Amino acid sequence: MASPKSRRSGFSKKQQYSVFTGYLLATLGALLGLALLAVSLAYPSLMQPLRGGATTVVSPVGEVTAAVRTERQGLWATLTGFWRAGSQNARLREEIEESRVRLAEAEAIAAENKRLKALLGLYGGESRPIATTRLVASSPSSVRRFAYIGVGTTDGVEIGMPVHSERGVIGRVLETSLGSSRVLLLTDTESVLPVRRAADQTVAFAEGRGDGLLRIRLINLGLNPLEVGDVFVTSGAGGYYRPGVAVAVLSELTPDGGIAQLIAEPSGTNYVSVEPIYQPLAVQASGVRDRDELTQEELAN
Amino acid sequence: MIDRIDPPVRRRAYGGDKINRVPDPWRTNSVHYITIVLGSILPWFIIADVMPIAPPLGFMFFLGWRLMRPGLMPLWAGVPLGAFDDLFSGQPFGSAIFLWSLTMIALEVIETRFPWRGFWLDWFTAGLGIALYIVACMFISGATISLSLFAMIAPQILFSILLYPIVARLIARADAFRLSRARRIG
């Protein structure tokens, strides 16, 4: 379609001025956007109240879509289940026998753990989740990987709290507002999580790659001890996540570690729980700035 | 005398036989903004944990309205609409304000070069705009840029470009609704 006649300025001074003003405002708008962009890249939390307010208003709709999503997945699982019902049944029976034995063993180990912890005088209480909710939304058209949950500061959610599903770690709370919070998923490129191999004490960092996989980077370099199929759990370092929660399975080896796949996929979860920060003191201590630290003279006093 | 079964197509599209009707001014001035705002919110409800899968629907509606109805939105419309998109897109605040304003200016310049355009040229312009927009969004998203990110956005770009004709159809429907003669006079 050609532009309408009214937009061609011709000799009319008034028209010419209004066209010029339009260009001027659009250019100013672009400059304003550029300035806001620079500010929010430098201080990401500056626009948080505005964004949080908007997501709080819209997130109830997300509860509905989340419920529909779960229903649909259940339906699909039921349909596909019909195909391999017989063979699957036999295999599951075998598996359940085996896991009963493992469960009994695990109970014994748990009891022993409790006894040893009591011996050492360690506090070994299981932490209760702050809130249980659904993932209501995400950032599907951006390369950043954020998810949104329908609980906020009114439910006691604070920045930094880990978010778990029934299978393992999903991410941690990045921003909170009254009725919704933004979660940084493990697959985001800016997410780093201290992990260890479940079988032994090989420690590593799990970094998001932005494409759904995690990059496992060993802290102690040398011979790469990892093997494909190794399971990684949180190590508890850094103080955010409690140790021993499943994170990822190694699928590929690289010289400094490997590439791992998530165990808890956010799109496949039903409910997620927001857990308290594992060691708030450690997190606080890591946030102490250099100029806030006590000087040698103050320590001497 | 035999009556005509159907009223002529043009009259039917804009409200039938009723001659005492005019387009509703509220509708005429709001439908395009509402569709763009809805386009910004809708993809938000998709859970994408692996890669960017949804097209930037808000931007596509914005671009589509601009291409199909030049002059309907003021040149600075990218500022408020972009600000709203930034609240939900997960991009740093200001990225859509900046890029949508640039889009408006760029299209204005293109339009002075090609005043008469058809659907194919529109699709080409929109496809180019969408591809550039998604790549620019990646660079200013604050993510660590790596080769795997480029591999991630390639399917999203392709999907968005292929989706444009459908978006254009939706906009055409919304436009017919916008201009339908809904207000009774006299």
Image (spheres, coloured by chain):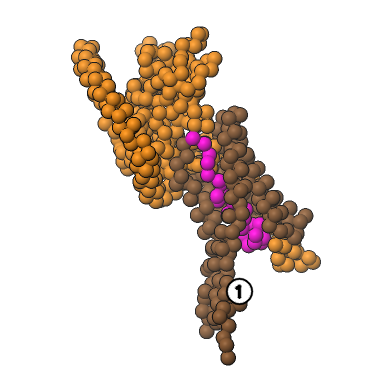
Q: Eyeballing the image, is A256 above or below B157? A: above
Regarding mark 1 in the picture, which secondary structure is present there? helix
**Image spot of residue B27 (x, y percent):** 53, 67
Which colour is chain B painted? brown
**Image spot of residue A20 (x, y percent):** 72, 57
**Closer to the camera in the image, A83 or A74:** A83
User: Which residue is rendered at x = 52% and y = 84% of the image?
Assistant: B186
Q: Quadrant of residue B133?
A: top right
Q: Is residue A242 left or right of residue B113?
A: left
Chain rendered orange = A
Q: Which residues are magenta?
A: B50-73
Crowd rating for badge 1 (residues with CA inside 10 Å; few <14, some 14–19, many 20+)? few
User: Which residue is rendered at x = 67% and y = 60% of the image?
Assistant: B70
Q: Amino acid type of disc 1?
A: Val
User: Which residue is rendered at x = 53% and y = 39% of the image?
Assistant: B52
**Closer to the camera in the image, A235 or A155:** A235
